[in-house]
Structures are given as structure tokens and as C-alpha cells.
Amino acid sequence: MQFCKPVFLSLLSLLSAHILLATPSWENLGGSFQGKPSAAFSADGRLEVFVRGNDNALWFAAQTSPGGSWTPFVSLGGVIISDPTAVQEEVGGTISVFALGTDNAVWTRSQTQSGIDNYSDWTSIGGIGASDLAVAETFADLHHPFSEVLLYMRGADNTLWSNRQTNASIWSGWGSGSGYLTSAPGAALLPNENSDVFVRGGDNGLWRQYGGGWVTLGGAMNGPPVVAQINGSVTYRGLDNAAWFSLYNGTSWAEPVSLGGYIISNPTMAYCDPRIPGCGDPNNLEVFAVGGDNALWVTVSQGSPFGPWQSLGGSIAGDPFAFLTRDGTIEVFAIGPDGTLSHIRQSAPGSWQ
């Protein structure tokens, strides 16, 4: 991936952003990939990243130790037609990865033992999908006696379909579709321990499914919604090519507000694993997106309105993926124009310098 500090910005970017005095350093992990990466923690604290190869197989790389260097990429085979999505399951602590196969069904591979990078064979859990998948997980407590992995997708009929897996590793089967989707869904566990699902509707507005019904939050979307696990926040790219944001205040979702800027990717927030201390702090939110110069940009809110957009450099083709690590820093993965995967990590929580 060829990384450089941006030298040409649109007028809109100049009005709403500034460049960091010291652009952080990106690390190239190599490979030949497409689409949007996904990541999850292994049980021993190492981060693992999953991505669809240009050969349409699933590939992964893993840290050699928590926060340490990265292994070379290894193919997990298969032929997938969607971006992968990964989750570390609470029971057993194994990582499971999901993607659509050439038959449009959902296929999965899982670690055979927690913390060990040996994966099972591909297994189909059926369904007929027409989008990337969204995954959320509930955790065992007084309200949920068992942990559950929840999968959502846009079906071939453009409705929302869902499936759930309990700690008995049994899938309930794909539930009847509802709504009308024009994007892949986004889903997450909220601070109230319930899962929410968001989609772009036929009117390009942001719609939320909760309790079996649908409610619109308005807006005009130019891509799918992105939801941060447990943060109670959702972001998307608007028809005006600005980033938009909505926050859950504990009882209801606020009307989306513009974060400004000019972006050419879908924005993202750091996926937040509820097992990380401080996860879900609404006073520390960061939204990332690719700007018109193909660099990664970030806007930060620390208990107040989001600040100006800042450039983190790089040269990106596609959507970035952000993840909150166990030391409180954010790591962002992105594929470059040459197909290699690179990543960038905060020097300290809340700091990109």
C-alpha cells in the first residue's frame, strides 16, 4: 500500500478539517485482498483480522502476542461472495467467522480450541442472503441466562432475516423476513443489553427494528449503517457525502446529525467488545472515513460535539474497519489500491500523534 500525506484537499475538506502535525505511521501486512476487513479477539488477548482475498477465499492474520507483531496471512479457503464478519463467542472463547458462499447461503468456520489458530471446516447454516452480514452478541447475565450470537442479513426478497445461536451451539433457523432493505444491516448490543438492528429503507432513510416493529429515524443515506457494539451509536454516509451520526441516550435514538466533511467510503466506529473495561463510554467516540484524497480521516467527540476532521494519512480503496483493543487504543485496518492490508494504531488512548 502506498501511503503519503495528502497534498490536495477539496474546498469542503479545508473548511471542515485540519491535518495532524505528525501523520501517524501505517504498517503494511501484505496480501492481495478486496472489500472490508473484520477483526476479533482470540481468547489469549491477541487480535486476529479476517479479509476476503482477490481469490475469493477467506484469509486471516494474527498477532503473535497481545499488541505484538503480526503473522503472515494464511488462507482458510472457501469461495465467499461477501465480506467476512467475525466474533469471539463468550462460551468457550472461540472465534467464529461468517460469510456468504456462492450458493448465497451463510457459511462459517470456527476455532477448534480457544486461543489456538486451528479452524474447523466450513459449515453451512443456510439462508439466502443478498448482502454482507451483521453480527451481535448478548452475554450471559440475569437478563440473558445464555450468551447468544445473533446474525442478520438482507435476504433475496430485500427483507431482514435473522438467526441466533445459543451456548449449546445450536442455530435456531432463519426467521421470517420483515421490512424493506436497500442495504446490508448493521447490528449491535446496546448498553441496555438488547440488540438493535439498523438498515437503509426504500426511502433511503435510517430505519431501526426493535421489538418486532420498525421505526424511522429519518435521514438520507448513501450506504449501509454502521453500529458500534454496545456504544449506542450509529453512523452512515449521507446522500450529501458527509458523515452522519445518531446517539442512543438510554431511552431513545436522537435524530441523525451531520458530522460534515466529504467522504468516499462508508464511515465506521471502533467495534467495542463489552469485555473491555470502559467499553461503551459515550464520552469517547471516534468516527473514521476515507476522504476525497483517499486518506483516512477521523473526527472525535469527548463528551461534546464532534471536533474537526483530522487526516491520518494513508491511501485506501474501500471501507476501513476500526477496533478497540484491550489497552484502550483503537486500531484501524484498511485495504490499499494495490490490494494489500495495512493498519494504524493509536500511540495512546485518544491520541493519534
Image (spheres, helix red, strand yellow):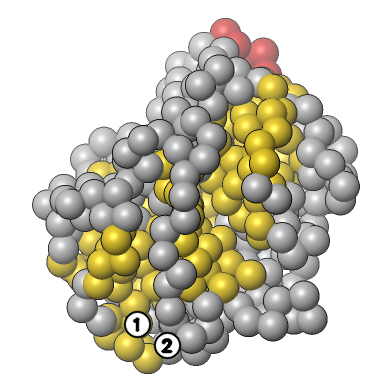
Q: Quadrant of residue 49?
A: bottom left
* Residue occupying image coordinates x 67% and y 13%: 15
Q: Position of residue 211 (x, y in %)?
A: 70, 50
Frontmost residue, 295 versus 151: 151
In-image side of 275 versus 52 (left or right) = right
Q: Residue furthest left?
A: 55
Q: Quick one: SS at disc 2?
A: loop
Residue 145, compared with residue 135, is above or below; it is below
Q: Check disc 2 and give the amino acid type.
A: Gly
In-image side of 160 versus 22 (left or right) = left
In-image side of 290 versus 194 (left or right) = left
Task: Check disc 2 and report the residue beneath it.
Answer: 115
* Residue occupying image coordinates x 56% and y 81%: 90
* Residue occupying image coordinates x 43% and y 72%: 171
Q: Split into 4 quadrants, where in the image is the N terminus?
A: top left
In-image side of 302 versus 165 (left or right) = right
Q: Check disc 1 and give the amino acid type.
A: Gln
Task: Check disc 1 and report the residue beneath it.
Answer: 111
Residue 111, compared with residue 255, is above or below; it is below
Q: Position of residue 255 (x, y in %)?
A: 78, 27
